[in-house]
Image (tube, rainbow, N blue to C red):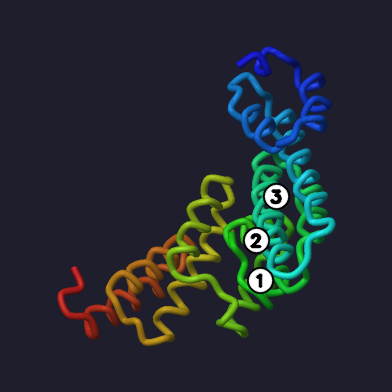
């Protein structure tokens, strides 16, 4: 409790001298009076400490610790995006392992990647990669969550692009559920493509049992 009364300027040097500095940082993150800038400072400090912990670790232990660092960095990138610090978020993204950045391995938080791509004007390229390498693409639930996150970011055009990709992919794969037809029809309406939306609804009525 007493640590909460310290300023962030005082507390960070103390964290370097404790046996478990991450716990101190975690505790500070719950202080309601922290500003957005202070939270970014704390998250950066925690990430730095985790990176240092990689030194001297090998084999499975290092691999597990690297996974923790990657997850923490993705969380930090999300926080930077929340605070409109896009350039810094891009810089942090480049520090992730190359296989994670290029789809060579599973991304533990693809929503962050999609949000960053939307802010960096690379969303079209990312969706194209998902299309050409479907094994790297997030599943339906993740893409829906990404679209919701983009709506919260007030980036409706990016959200529509993600949903367009999702429903087009699902229908092309033979998943002719009413939800996919309705979802894509709604996307077409948002794109002001009313004729295409009506055509989708007609197709749904012909193919789907009990569409409504």
Q: Pointer 1: residues within 10 angstroms few (<14), some, or many (20+)?
A: some
Above or below for 104 versus 37: below
Q: Residue at x 60, y 16 (%)?
A: 1
Is there a contact, CB below 8 Å, between mark 3 and mark 2? no
Q: Position of residue 110 (x, y in %)?
A: 59, 63
Give the labeled residue for mark 1.
126
Foreground residue, 120 or 42? 42
What's the mark number on residue 77?
A: 3
Q: Earlier in the sequence, mark 3 or mark 2?
A: 3
Give the spatial CA distance, label 2 vs label 1: 9 Å
* The quadrant where residue 34 appears: top right
Above or below for 52 versus 208: above
Nearest to viewer (mark 2 / mark 1): 2
Q: Pointer 2: residues within 10 angstroms few (<14), some, or many (20+)?
A: some
| Quadrant location of the C terminus in the rendered image | bottom left
Circle 1: element type? helix
* The quadrant where residue 161 appears: bottom right
* The quadrant where residue 98 appears: bottom right
Q: Position of residue 82 (x, y in %)?
A: 64, 41
Nearest to viewer (mark 3 / mark 1): 3
Give the spatial CA distance, label 3 vs label 2: 9 Å
Q: Position of residue 174 (x, y in %)?
A: 36, 87
Above or below for 88 versus 106: above
Is there a contact, CB below 8 Å, between mark 2 and mark 1? yes
What's the mark number on residue 108?
A: none
Foreground residue, 166 or 18? 18
Q: Earlier in the sequence, mark 3 or mark 1?
A: 3
Q: Residue at x 68, y 18 (%)?
A: 3
Give the labeled residue for mark 2.
113
Give the spatial CA distance, label 3 vs label 1: 17 Å
Foreground residue, 13 or 81? 13
């Amino acid at each position: 409790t007493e640590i909460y009364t310290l300023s962030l300027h005082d507390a960070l040097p103390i964290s370097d001298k404790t046996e478990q500095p991450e716990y101190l940082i975690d505790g500070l993150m719950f202080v309601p009076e922290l500003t957005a800038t202070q939270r970014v400072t704390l998250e950066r400090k925690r990430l730095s400490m985790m990176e240092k912990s990689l030194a001297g670790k090998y084999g499975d232990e290092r691999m597990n610790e690297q996974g923790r660092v990657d997850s923490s960095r993705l969380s930090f990138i999300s926080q930077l995006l929340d605070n409109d610090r896009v350039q810094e978020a891009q810089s942090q993204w480049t520090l992730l392992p190359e296989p994670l950045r290029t789809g060579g391995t599973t991304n533990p938080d693809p929503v962050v990647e999609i949000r960053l791509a939307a802010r960096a004007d690379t969303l079209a390229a990312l969706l194209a990669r998902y299309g050409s390498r479907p094994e790297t693409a997030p599943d339906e639930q993740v893409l829906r969550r990404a679209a919701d996150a983009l709506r919260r970011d007030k980036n409706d055009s990016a959200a529509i692009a993600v949903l367009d990709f999702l429903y087009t992919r699902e229908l092309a794969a033979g998943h002719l559920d009413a939800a996919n037809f309705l979802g894509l029809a709604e996307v077409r309406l948002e794109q002001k493509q009313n004729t295409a939306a009506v055509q989708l609804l007609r197709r749904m009525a012909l193919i789907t049992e009990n569409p409504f």
